[in-house]
Amino acid sequence: MSDQPPCESADEDRWCTKASGEVGGLRSWSCSTMPVAVGPYGQTQPSCFDRVKMGFMMGFAVGMAAGAMFGTFSCLRVGMRGRELMGGVGKTMMQSGGTFGTFMSIGMGIRC
């Protein structure tokens, strides 16, 4: 009668599908538990080196974004155009990405 599965429990890890056919005029449901998601490290925690590496990558990405904004503004302010502008912005992005990535990796290393 109902298109909704029966609420047998409040568990979030259960899922139900309609079974083929009806039983006694009622729809039957087939319920089972969902599989456990396994991350890239399996069931273990990432190593300290992996955490430091991830901190550097996150910091580098944020530093590159900040360097793009600040580098573009400062290069345009001094009158750079064309190839000179692209070189100046790229240099600023790499410098700020490396700096911020280094500090983020140090911070993640302290947390290990």
Image (tube, rainbow, N blue to C red):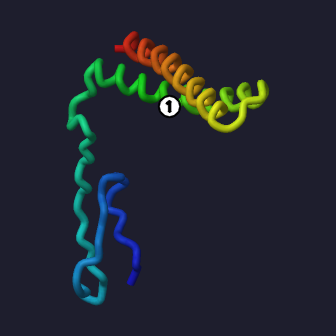
Q: Is residue 17 left or right of residue 70?
A: left
Q: Residue at x 42, y 28 (%)?
A: 57
Q: Position of residue 98 (x, y in %)?
A: 48, 20
- Extreme front residue here? 83
Q: Which residue is mark 1?
A: 61
Q: Secondary structure at mark 1?
A: helix
Give residue 112's quadrant in the image.
top left
Can residue 81 be seen here? yes
Q: Is residue 37 above or below residue 17?
A: above
Q: Position of residue 69 (x, y in %)?
A: 67, 32
Q: Is residue 8 left or right of residue 100?
A: left
Q: Is residue 87 above or below residue 6?
A: above
Q: Residue at x 67, y 38 (%)?
A: 82
Q: Residue at x 72, y 30 (%)?
A: 80
Mark 1 nearby-residue class (10 Å; few <14, some 14–19, many ≥20):
some
Q: Residue at x 62, y 30 (%)?
A: 89
Q: Position of residue 86 (x, y in %)?
A: 61, 34
